[in-house]
Amino acid sequence: MKRVKSVICTIMMMFVISACAGRTSNDSAVSMSGQEEISKETEEMTMTASPGNGSDEMPEQEGSKEEAVAMNELCLSVGDKRMSVEWEDNESVDALKDLAGSGMNINMSMYGGFEQVGSIGTSLPRNDSQTTTSPGDIVLYSGNQIVIFYGSNSWAYTRLGKITGLDEKELEDTFGNGDVTISLSVGAQTASEATKSFDFADRTVMLNSGYEMPIMGLGTYSLDHDTCVNSVKTLLQNGGRLIDTAYMYGNEDVVGEGIRQAMEEYGISREEIFVITKIYPSQFGDPEAAIDMALEKLDIGYIDMMLLHHPGNGDVEAYKTMERYVEEGKIRSLGLSNWYVEELTDFLPQITITPALVQNEIHPYYQEQEVVPFIQEKGIVVQCWYPLGGRGHTSELLGDETIKSIAEAHGVSSAQVILRWDLQRGIVVIPGSGNPDHIKENLDLFGFELTEDEMEKISLLDRGEKHDWY
């Protein structure tokens, strides 16, 4: 996808103490870490549902000027707490914002009983002057160190800003009890803003890595060779551009074959297509070999996004290896699958590039109403696997009376209602199917919109009922 250089569009959030999936048989209702493979029984049910109402596009959502400013805001966090900061208007802050646009954690150390000091690894423009600081002041020292004061000092600094909203005791409690790690980002969002970040006209979302990703696509688990090739081509021929695969699916080479055929037959450029793959914990011991193998099997030049399939021994080092491949341009964005609050809280402080995506099990019977906003508030996009309930549960979910009644009101299928519900929560969907009609139907999500009341009715279906162990 086309890299967008505008800082306004770049959303990077890295946190210190912060905070997808196994599918099995070919005729199961689900697929590993993100793909919904509809069984023959379920496909027959879905085939009886009405298609979308024919309208191909919803009006583009417009944000206020205040929201545009927020998207360009430099944000500072400690753990899961975002600090309110009044930033200076100077070249140093502008340069720091550009730097934070790539995402950064800064490990800081206590010094002198009144400040935390951390190196940023590069030099920023500076305009030092003799300064007497007070608690909450943020300054640049020697051009390459950020200093946050919980006490006061007098020295030659360049002023960057001041933390507001915390009294001296709160500042000392935050910064005066041992070393800390701070996170800087541009345009951190609230969970409600995550939906607004979806471009329903272009059907994309801007990732914190600076790349656009389609908000709906295709999962490919358990599709045999010919079915997988045809499914990929059907998706691409009908306007879909997002494809999810994984090492454990055993079909990266087939996905690549389908993409290459579609590019040649339909005149689609590689830059239009967004491909996600994953490395499995069994590969964490030699991540270079795992990444190289994925690149070779896909044979499409580069990988748009690579995920760790789920936590495991060596996951931090495997992720750091993926970070190096990002620097080399072989991978464009990184993410995680099956990471929840506890896992993210432990993992994020140990890495440099904030994940652009977390892929978890989400469906109306398992809605992750706390986990989803926890992730989204860090500027990380959420993507769901098992969107239609998962193996052995899809028929029940599609037959749910609440969902069926909403579908009837809009003249669409139950599957379309569920997928649209995800989109309106700011969650990317990748249902999988080997049925061309269902692939087309799963892309037809923009001719209707659920009301607030309908969204609320679906939210009340949450049972906390997880359908897989991840």
Image (spheres, rainbow, N blue to C red):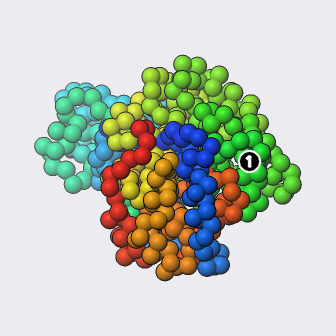
* Left or right for 439, reference 366: right
Can you see residue 143? no
The x, y position of residue 306, in whole percent, is 59, 38
Question: Camera-side residue: 424 or 435?
Answer: 435
- Under mark 1, the amino acid is Thr
Q: Is residue 29 above or below residue 405?
A: above
Q: Which residue is mark 1?
A: 227
Q: Classify residue 424 as left or right of residue 330.
A: left
**Apparent side of residue 329 relative to residue 381 in the rendered image (left or right):** right
Say if 415 sits above or below 99 in the image: below
407 versus 313 height, above or below: below
Residue toward you, 234 or 193 = 234
Label 1: how many residues lie within 10 Å, few (<14), some (14-19) or many (20+)? some
Quadrant of the image containing the C terminus: top left
Can the viewer see residue 48? yes
Which residue is at the front of the view, 380 or 384? 384
For this orientation, the residue located farthest to the front is 41
Q: Is residue 413 left or right of residue 235?
A: left
